[in-house]
Amino acid sequence: MTQDVPHSNPASVQANGIELVYDTFGQPSAPPLLLIMGLGGQMIAWDDEFCAQLAARGYWVIRFDNRDVGLSTKFDQAGVPDMAALAWARAQGEAIQAPYTLADMADDAAGLLDALGAGSAHVVGVSMGGMIAQAMAIRHPDRVRTLTSIMSSTGNPDLPPPAAEALEILLKPAPTDRDGYLESAVQSQQVLGGSPFPVDKDYTRERARRAFDRGLHPKGIARQMAAILASGSRKEALRSVTVPTLVIHGDADPLVPVEGGIDTADAVPGAELLIIEGMGHALPPALWPQVIDAIARHTV
């Protein structure tokens, strides 16, 4: 890992009435930069080295487990949503009920900043984490110094859907055995990653091993997916966002097509749009310099 970057041990705090587990990279005296992970992703899905490289640019980098994933509070008492019924309801334009919404998850993130004594932070979200970051800028604009939304979307139902093979990965239950889970992670990356960026199978298996050993929670992933569906479109609300906004998206994203990033940048007044050629729905190490440089420029 990048030398001379402090990395805290994982810790837990009470935030928004639940327990969130987090860790940090860099010096607490530096400007806070909050990383929000996507659907079903534990905080360690933000690679340690990626976090350390960001911290080396002069930030106090904070990553955390969203509710219902990793080591943060689970909502098993709420049951498992019927995803087919929810998808049908959305297609019919009906209101969707879910145990919680992206707004609740945005409030979690603001509560984490409260617990850490951070009045505001640069907020960076990826995929569902980008949606949460957008909701945070809408609901808590005073807590967001800058917003960076990566491979995400406004939730606009008129946007193109995922490619069939990417949707299959999203909906297919992950294997429950360790070896099967590791191989499914490689297969998923081969579909989701951009073609110019060959999948490093050993690297992907190691990341999957850490996630498996730390603890998977498929029921929580279903509830997070229900939260996305129940939250609807943020497009109109995003027109009120005044925090400096950067949108990063790949032109080869099969899960959240690039139109989602374009729609986000169009919705937020003055937003900057960075489309990366060949980038899929992944952040391979080959793209870290470009992404970190873009974040660093945006957050000056």
Image (cartoon, rainbow, N blue to C red):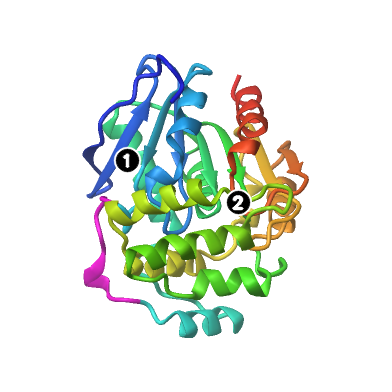
Residue 177, x across and y down, in percent = 32, 68
Badge 2: residue crowd in 10 Å (few <14, some 14–19, many ≥20): some
> What secondary structure is the magenta-colored segment mainly?
loop
- Say which of 169 and 28 sits in front: 169
Of pointers 1 and 2, the one earlier in the residue sequence: 1
Amino acid type, callout 2: Val
Q: Is residue 178 above or below residue 98?
A: above
**Image-based side of 221 in relation to 262, left or right:** left
Q: Quadrant of residue 284?
A: top right
Identified at 35% across, 33% down, the residue is 113
**Magenta residue check for 73:** yes
Count all numbered tags in the image, as a single digit.
Answer: 2
**Image-based side of 148 in relation to 129, left or right:** right
Q: Quadrant of residue 296?
A: top right
Residue 185, x across and y down, in percent = 48, 60
The numbered dot on residue 111 is 1
**Magenta residue check for 289:** no
Quarter of the image containing the N terminus?
top left
Instruction: Look at the image and give the residue range highlighted in magenta.
Output: 71-80
Q: Is residue 57 above or below residue 162?
A: above
Badge 1: residue crowd in 10 Å (few <14, some 14–19, many ≥20): many
The numbered dot on residue 199 is 2
Q: Quadrant of residue 193?
A: bottom right
Report the mark closest to the observer, 1 or 2: 2
Q: Secondary structure at mark 2?
A: loop
Identified at 59% across, 57% down, the residue is 234
